[in-house]
Image (cartoon, rainbow, N blue to C red):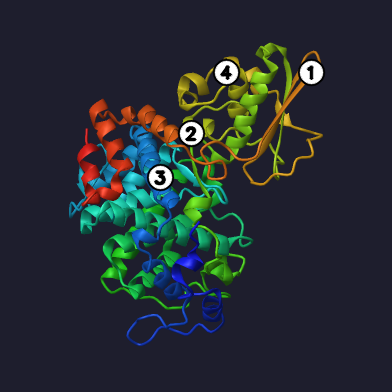
């Protein structure tokens, strides 16, 4: 597996970045960052990447991100928060740089990035990073494709932009670890958007550094909004903020070079102060190691527990009325989160009792469980009430934070237990194209696309590295 350290052959080593963090200097009078700035060091490394530098799995995961994001966007295209933001963008439209997916309207590229990201985030059916539950792929696809329409670029260019954008956000997310609590993961998603947009716009190293810096200054997010429409608003804002930052930096907007450095920069204020996390770690690309594609709707960290519930339910083979308790446990599992009587889509997709009870009752969990018929079925209420924390959880060593264990206890006292370390569709288990294709074909009709357009767009995604224009995909995404 090609590593970043081998790729760059020491051009930017850990020592150089650490030295930068220790001796940051202010921006020069001409506005360009000093050589010691972390943002410029990171920008130089990311700007040096070319398509042939990417391992094959990074390319495949990039394609999967595009397919998964579009499928999630199709599912969310009819939801109310997406409609509101789309209507506002059309009201404010000036230059029609980029296409609004499925709608066919055109808006400025940064607004198109916001609207298209909202479609995907609203449905909560996109992707996540298995370390921190940040939905990088939505912003990467929305911003990258919008800038492809604005500035041009090939399919290879877009795949590189996705890979390096993912890398930037992952490293800065690692640098934030251990820091201030209550900040939503969308904050680091903005960096993914900025770097992807900057690559598609062809920014210089200095300009890309300023785009990273501008994003650090402007992107917020509060975790308290996870269970309301604020969640998709923050995700859409990440795509918008990063795209706008890249456009501003491309026009010559500059910020100070030490925007990332602790103690007063972004890493020190929001993170744990570990500037070393921005440096290459010598391992495989983050998009290879940590990408997870949702294979059913809703809160992704529950997915291991949901899969364990399916397994335990099948082993038990018991009717709901024969089940006395459904016990859940997992890494740091201290609550059974979410409503036991979900009354909206937002409540349903964040309810662990709903997820687990449905998985046990039906012996599966799939896209149909994101429909009102399933979410609001009162017949499920008694089983949801039996979902509880395991008072004596099995002694399991979990390799990933999304692992989960479910034990079904029947009225007769029989117990059936299943543990899942990492869910299907995640990098630790390997992501299968068959799963991504099935998701695409299941959700894309929700946007009103014809079967022919769905198949042609999926075929294009599979072969996107051959495309002379990344914007060709838009030809298939208008109803």
Q: Secondary structure at mark 1?
A: loop
Q: Position of residue 65 (x, y in %)?
A: 40, 45
Left or right of residue 415: residue 268: left
Q: Position of residue 351 (x, y in %)?
A: 58, 32
> Which residue position is annotated with label 4?
362
Q: Earlier in the sequence, mark 1 or mark 2?
A: 2
Q: Earlier in the sequence, mark 3 or mark 1?
A: 3
Q: Earlier in the sequence, mark 4 or mark 1?
A: 4
Label 3 close to label 4 by CB (< 8 Å) = no
Label 4 close to label 1 by CB (< 8 Å) = no
Q: Residue at x 40, y 39 (%)?
A: 68
Q: Earlier in the sequence, mark 3 or mark 2?
A: 3
Q: Earlier in the sequence, mark 3 or mark 4?
A: 3
> Which residue position is annotated with label 3?
65
Alpha-carbon distance for marks 4 and 2? 16 Å
Q: Secondary structure at mark 4?
A: helix
Q: Is residue 205 above or below residue 171?
A: below
Badge 4 density bin: few <14, some 14–19, many ≥20, Cα 10 Å: some
Q: Secondary structure at mark 2?
A: loop
**Mark 3 or mark 4: which is in front?**
3
Q: Is residue 145 above or below residue 33?
A: above
Say which quadrant the C terminus sits in: top left
> Which residue position is annotated with label 1?
414
Q: Earlier in the sequence, mark 4 or mark 2?
A: 2
Alpha-carbon distance for marks 3 and 4? 29 Å
Q: Residue at x 74, y 44 (%)?
A: 397
Residue 295, numbered label: 2
Left or right of residue 220: residue 101: left
């Amino acid at each position: 597996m090609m590593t970043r350290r081998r790729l760059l052959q020491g051009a930017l080593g850990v020592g150089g970045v650490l030295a930068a963090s220790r001796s940051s200097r202010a921006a020069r009078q001409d506005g360009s960052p000093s050589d010691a700035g972390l943002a410029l060091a990171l920008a130089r490394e990311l700007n040096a990447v070319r398509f042939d530098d990417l391992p094959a799995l990074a390319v495949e995961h990039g394609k999967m991100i595009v397919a998964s994001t579009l499928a999630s966007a199709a599912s969310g295209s009819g939801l109310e928060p997406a409609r509101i933001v789309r209507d506002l963008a059309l009201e404010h439209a000036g230059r029609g740089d980029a296409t609004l997916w499925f709608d066919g309207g055109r808006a400025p590229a940064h607004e198109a990035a916001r609207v298209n990201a909202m479609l995907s985030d609203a449905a909560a059916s996109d992707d996540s990073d298995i370390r921190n539950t940040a939905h990088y792929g939505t912003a990467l696809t929305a911003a990258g494709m919008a800038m492809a329409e604005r500035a041009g670029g090939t399919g290879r260019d877009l795949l590189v932009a996705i890979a390096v954008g993912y890398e930037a956000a992952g490293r800065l997310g690692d640098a934030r670890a251990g820091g201030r609590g209550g900040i939503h993961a969308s904050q680091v998603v903005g960096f993914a958007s900025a770097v992807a947009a900057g690559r598609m716009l062809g920014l210089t190293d200095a300009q890309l550094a300023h785009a990273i810096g501008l994003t650090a200054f402007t992107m917020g997010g509060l975790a308290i909004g996870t269970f309301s429409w604020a969640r998709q608003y923050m995700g859409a804002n990440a795509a918008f903020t990063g795209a706008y930052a890249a456009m501003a930096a491309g026009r010559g907007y500059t910020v100070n070079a030490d925007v990332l450095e602790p103690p007063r920069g972004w890493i020190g204020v929001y993170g744990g102060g570990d500037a070393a996390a921005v440096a290459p770690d010598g391992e495989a690309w983050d998009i290879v190691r940590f990408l997870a594609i949702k294979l059913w709707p809703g809160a992704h960290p529950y997915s291991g527990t949901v899969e364990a519930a399916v397994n335990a339910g099948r082993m038990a083979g018991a009717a709901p009325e024969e089940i006395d308790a459904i016990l859940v446990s997992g890494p740091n599992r201290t609550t059974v989160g979410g409503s036991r009587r979900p009354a909206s889509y937002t409540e349903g997709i964040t309810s662990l009792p709903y997820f687990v009870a449905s998985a046990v009752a039906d012996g599966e969990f799939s896209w149909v469980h994101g429909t009102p018929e399933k979410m609001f079925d009162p017949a499920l209420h008694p089983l949801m009430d039996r979902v509880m924390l395991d008072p004596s959880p099995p002694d399991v060593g979990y390799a990933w934070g999304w692992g989960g264990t479910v034990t079904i206890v029947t009225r007769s006292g029989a117990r059936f237990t299943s543990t899942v370390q990492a869910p299907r569709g995640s990098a630790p288990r390997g992501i299968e194209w068959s799963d991504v294709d099935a998701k695409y074909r299941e959700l894309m009709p929700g946007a009103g696309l014809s079967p022919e357009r769905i198949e042609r767009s999926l075929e294009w995604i599979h072969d996107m590295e051959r495309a002379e224009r990344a914007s060709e995909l838009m030809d298939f995404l208008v109803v």
